[in-house]
Image: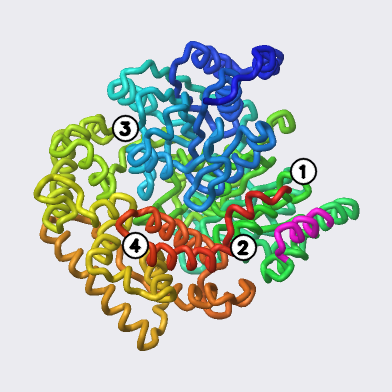
Amino acid sequence: MFEKKPEIDNNRRMDKYKDLILDKFQKQAIEEMNRDNSIIISAPTGAGKTLIAEYAIEKAISGNKGIIYTAPVKALSNQKYRDFQKLYKDKAGILTGDVSINSEAEVLIMTTEIFRNLILTEPERLSKKEWVIFDEIHYLDDFERGTVWEESLMLMPRHLKILALSATVPNVDKISGWLNEIHHIPIKVIKENVRPVPLKFFFQSSNRIFTKLEDLEESIIETNEIRKVGKIRRKEAAPKPNRIQTLFEHLKEKGALPCIYFTFSRARTEILAQELAKFDFLNKDGKEKITGLYKKLISKFDLYNDPTAGYLTELVKKGIAFHHAGLLPTLKEVIEQLFTSRLLKVIFTTETFALGINMPARTVVFDTLRKFYGRYHRNLKTRDLYQMSGRAGRRGIDKQGFVFLRINPASISINELKDTLYGQPEKITSQLRSNYATILNLYKDLGENIYDIYPLSFHSYQSDRYDKDEALSLIKSKLSLLKNLNYITGGGNLSNKGKLASRIYSYELQAGEMYEKNFLQELGEKELAMVISSLIYQPRKNQRRPRLNKKERALAYTLTNITKVIHKEEKKFRIYPQAKRFYFHLNQATLLWINGIKFSKLSKFTDIDEGEIVRYFRMDIQMLRELILFEGFGEEFKQKAKRIIRRLNRDVVDAEKQLRQEI
């Protein structure tokens, strides 16, 4: 039990909310929370949803109750831990795949994957918690990870109350209807459509700045008319390229900085930052302050030898930086600290910077309105446009937020632009794809009654008869495969390899087949490290294949044959998409790293970005920890895995060390 505090201290904790000037939707949310109702809040980015989450945490602490805060990505989990640790001291903890700090704390931050896993494997750890906060619940719609959110909401313990925070979505009532039906708890919907800081949109096209969409449309029509006249004037009518210098001269002149510039390419963030280097956004005092802060942070995170940190130095002195997933996690954190200091005036970044991280600016710029959505390129969704635009306009500082859209008429028509700008935000649709580990965990408790679970899903709630039948058919096919491959025994129990597979999400069958063949157990340390690396690594599109030596080719041959067996079975049962293949692109870097090479030298031996290397090494560590916890492995194997973890988990790879660093 949590230690009970004197009642007067608890009252004082809540007193600060009495004097705050709250928006109507914030007051409504707090009233519903005080009635112990679950809540879904649909509101624009920047509207003030964070205050409601903090009230829920304060309320839980004052009542000596526990609360869970789930986040869609580790970067947001880490930021929330830093924020909450400052606010709540030793009452805050974090539990992700690669970090466990104060994991029994009253206020426990975790990724949604970890929350889902606890529901299925260690539900008793949730017994002392009263609330769970789902930040960015519209992630239900994410093609890659929506399944995790749906399973979490569908299977969560009935004693937990929900505070769900979402960007503006039109079918939030549908989600609440689903949750009310499956949990039988009062869940109130609170909607807010107005931002406290209104947005004003501008457009750059043919290297001109347009303040009205009508003027942009007229310009495009005129250009098209000129093109129709004949060949002589076609060259004259060709749209001029949008120059970044023109845009930033305008922003600087209008006092529209600081600026977050979104692009959907890592490489382009760096290219644009270098193009802008001819500008200098800081005076002498600003240069001294930001240089001092940058040096201090670089020293704290031991980044003196990182080439990208060195390259950024001259840009930072001018108030410019870039930020993307390819950077070292520690360097990304340094850049985030620079931006929150308000000394950094322009940051070129990919869309993850918009995801819940509290980094508002005066202006947001979109480099393009075309984006890759997991399977194909398409125009930016209206919901995504306004989620990212929501970073423009700082509450209490700016009267307006400015959004600049860089338009190329050849890639997006005026009607498509209007659809994106003025269209209804896209509905949240289920992305449920039942994975083998979830099926195994549920079968362990429910046996053949497992099919009773699907009707509880959001997919079932919003689907027609045909789609429901398809989903149930896929579950039946996966269950049949698991039985056929002896993950589930004839007696209806999980076999040893079934128990292992139930722990290893996304790589269940590969892990199970390697275990059954005694393959993993017989590997040496280096070979085991390579196998884990090749299982987890996912190459980028068009990334060249690495050259393998004789020993690596033999290993690859065995692993490829294991995959072929799995794919043959999946094809027989008509299961798609099929289990992931093994890829060997990171093997050399993995071996060099566990042999002690300095990280600054590692980039010479791979074309994989630094941040990607760290992310995959951390995922390797997470996988090895799961293997160690499996009772079916002997002590010799577990000690081998522990030694690999120690050799992997050092320097910039050590996520816990990064989080414990005070800034």
The answer to which of marks 1 and 2 sits earlier in the sequence is 1
Q: Is residue 175 left or right of residue 196?
A: left
Is residue 297 part of the magenta span, yes or no?
yes
Classify residue 279 by image quadrant. bottom right
Residue linked to disc 4:
634
The percent coordinates of residue 470 (x first, y second) are 15, 43
The answer to which of marks 2 and 3 sits earlier in the sequence is 3
The answer to which of marks 2 and 4 sits earlier in the sequence is 4
Q: Is residue 21 left or right of residue 230?
A: right
Bounds of the magenta segment: 292-303
The kind of secondary structure element at disc 2 is helix
Q: Amino acid at mark 3?
A: Met
Viewer-closest of 280 and 179? 179
Residue linked to disc 1:
255
Residue linked to disc 2:
652
Residues tagged 4 and 3 counted as in contact (Cβ below 8 A)? no
Q: Report if residue 238 is visible in the image.
A: no
Q: Amino acid at mark 2?
A: Val
The kind of secondary structure element at disc 4 is loop
Image vertical order of residue 550 relative to residue 35, above or below: below
